[in-house]
Amino acid sequence: MCYSKSVVELFGSATTKERADTMPLDIVTTHNSDTYEHYRLDDCSLFTERGKVRRVPLEAMVPTGHTNEDGSELIDCQSLANYSALINAASGELLDTRPIGKSYNLVPHDLLFAKQADLLWDSELPTDNVKVIDRLYDGGLKAHRTVLFDDLASDVGKNGDRVQCRMDIFNSVDMSWAFQIFSGAYRDLCRNTLVFGGEKAYHQKRKHTRNLAPEAVINKATMGLNVWQNNRDQMKRWSGSTMSRDDFANVLAGTICKKKTEAAQAGQGSQVNETLLNRLLHGFQQERQELGNTMWAGYNALTDWSTHTDKGWTNGAGQEFVGQKKTAQTHNVQRQRMDMVRSVLTSPAWSSFERMAA
């Protein structure tokens, strides 16, 4: 178990439930990230063993205006009040030299996900058959946990197109990511992360201020059983709702492919990001071969782009493009793209098709 006395201090009292052991998968380390897949909500070993980060005093070397006996400049080491740096507690590696003020609410990854386990067990969500995917980035500065609920799965469309309910939590200890939680789904056929948007989604983002209350946000998310029900029905409607290539292109041109430069806003030059538009239209072409000219094909083209950032494509002129290389910053790109997909799903252009589907 990953509980400690500090859990109670941070979140309040909680009851730990015992769960049968299952054989976990090994931790996979690639591109400055660690991934650990397992089947226990209470297994926080990745975060306890590799993701513990602690603060250390931050000091400044300040010239005194005096010299040593050998003529060298005399330097005074002064502590910077109210600021600290971050190190990995296990390796001692200095992770971040930016000053972290005392007003920043540093929420440890292991304590956060331990509390999530308790709240999920206390909820009405079925937790006997879950798969957990834990990820650490940048030496422990950032963490991401995905919980897949095998007992909340449904077929969408034809040919056994199966999707699972999922819950994702993002956290950082270096001010780079806000605390974020969202509900979504996972498509088995293509391993896409399916992003939800609009009133049928649960998505919360909170800054790490003194007022951050992770327990309240997680608890509210676990109570959102209707989110899965609503979005499952929505995806089924999308699978039977017509959307042509031109329809999809028009939605994109008015949302994430619309240029925001001063020249574009002034009506000068191209108003559309052609590279991104071609990438997404290529994805739609691939998806509609199996899913037809449907909103479901358009939706999966978007989530394929946000999930598989390294995938290449060919534009309408036959030019080949390579995807983004997998680097230590791939996780940042994925999060940014997920937010962009969410903005499409909440746009008036997409909503108009959704109303027709309903």
Image (tube, rainbow, N blue to C red):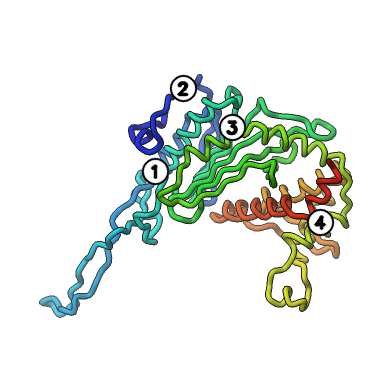
Q: Amino acid at mark 3?
A: Met
Judge the density around disc 4: few (<14), some (14-19), many (≥20) Cα neighbours within 10 Å: many
The residue at which mark 3 appears reads as 223
Q: Quadrant of the C terminus?
A: top right
| Residue 232, quarter of the rendered image | top right
The residue at which mark 1 appears reads as 52
| Residue 100, quarter of the rendered image | bottom left
| Foreground disc of the pair 4, 2 | 2
Contact between labelled residues 2 and 4, with CB atoms less than 8 Å apart: no
Depth check: 215 or 86 in front? 215
Residue 179, image x and y in percent? Answer: 51, 48
Marks 2/1: CA–CA distance:
23 Å
Label 4: element kind? helix
Residue 312, image x and y in percent? Answer: 73, 56
Q: Earlier in the sequence, mark 4 or mark 2?
A: 2
Q: Is residue 10 left or right of residue 181?
A: left
Residue 176, image x and y in percent? Answer: 49, 56
Q: Is residue 347 above or below residue 73?
A: above
The residue at which mark 4 appears reads as 281
